[in-house]
Amino acid sequence: MNEPRHPHALEIDYAYLEETLLQLLAIPSPVGLTDAVVRYTAGRFAALGIPYEITRRGAIRATLKGRESQPARAVVAHLDTLGAMVKSLKANGRLEIVPIGHWSARFAEGSRLTIFTDGGQVRGTCLPLKTSGHAFGGEIDTQPVGWEHVEVRVDLPAEDRAALDAAGLNVGDWIAFDPQPEIQPDGYINSRYLDDKAAVAALLTACKAIRDQGLALPVDVHPLLTITEEIGSGASAALHGEIAEMVSLDISIAAPGQNTSEHAATICMQDMSGPFDYHLTHKLIALAKEQGIAHRRDIFRYYRSDSAAAVEAGNDIRTALIGFGADASHAQERTHRDALVALTQLVIAYMTSEPVARRDCRSMGSLDGFTEQLCPGDMLVPSTPLPVPESFLGDPAQQQTDSERH
């Protein structure tokens, strides 16, 4: 049984969440260009009085001490975002680019951006190869979609490759697209990179609630911030052996055929890496029900998270995925205040709850204390028994005699 929690445990500082989100969005952080956002987030932990460590490349592992150190749990979100990189300097004075992370060039078209050169920054716009209707007529509507069909127009007097060279542009320069955030009075939030900066803001806000309200934690909790989730790796670098449970926080997909809502937290049952841990997932569902937190269950077929990276790296941990419902992932994303509040509340409820199994403090052990999904009485057996084969297989003549006798 979970111990009763503080009556104000689910109260959060939403103004802090929104402020943190906007500050995160103001910091460019495509994969590989994340030092600035790591420094910002480390400062946020320091301001809350939460100790942390940083890996060589910049993943952050903070610590909220509990009554017991094990079985410890981690709550992870990622600081990195999508972006692009210069592939070549073109003869027409524009840039060929390739994506960082997996996203469609369809959503890059028309976007303003910054190119980070060795010596500074250059502004530009991502455009289809054929842009002006006055020059190309109907061809602008029939040209293909793809990264090979867009280019970056730099805001420089550059009409050839030599001018780009002279301006200090190089193959391999990072590109960050403008987030273009807009927060509506009714609670809708539009922006690029809500994936996953909205979840980072929710995690920091949950940590603030723990600190402000002096909430007791049964076991140590490690907030983790990773920097390479968008390219498939992530949480494994900051995990230590004592961590037995890990909950990933990420964007959840509200779209036709999905059960996710922009007004609720989502508890993901399975993504493309497979089902999440039965017991941890159902614990989160029970907490949401107990606390009256708006939530949905969903399954994502074209999705993976920090949890998959951690398990594939060989970590024997229970994993789960919860998120904020949002529309148009990896495009111009939209969520609602309701979803961010629900996600933050669920994180607090999880942090202050008992671990799934005390046995998990050991990596190996006996059957004592091992979890149980189905009791023997829950296992249904076929209602129609099969006939004994020797009753109908054998000598045909004898079978005929037996039939006549009966």
Image (spheres, rainbow, N blue to C red):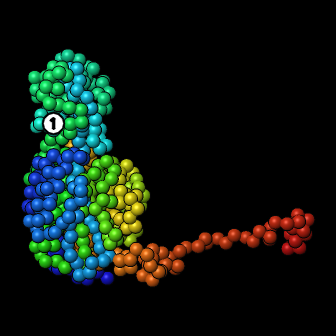
Q: Quadrant of the C terminus?
A: bottom right
Say whether residue 303 is left or right of residue 156: right
Q: Quadrant of residue 170?
A: top left
Residue 371 visible? The answer is yes
Point out residue 53 in the picture as x, y percentages from the top left corner.
20, 64
What residue do we see at 11% from left, 70% from top?
A: 49
Closer-to-camera residue (320/90): 90
What residue do we see at 52% from left, 79% from top?
A: 377
The residue to which callout 1 is attached is 117
Q: Quadrant of the N terminus?
A: bottom left
Q: Quadrant of residue 136?
A: top left
Say whether residue 232 is left or right of residue 20: right
Closer-to-camera residue (195/12): 195
Q: Among all residues in the image, which is located at the extreme top?
A: 135
Point out residue 19 in the picture as x, y percentages from the top left corner.
9, 57
Residue 263 visible? The answer is no
Q: Quadrant of residue 139?
A: top left
Point out residue 224 in the picture as x, y percentages from the top left corner.
24, 62
Above or below, comparing residue 49 to residue 108 in the picture: below
Q: Amino acid at mark 1?
A: Thr
Say which element carries label 1.
loop
Point out residue 199 in the picture as x, y percentages from the top left corner.
21, 58
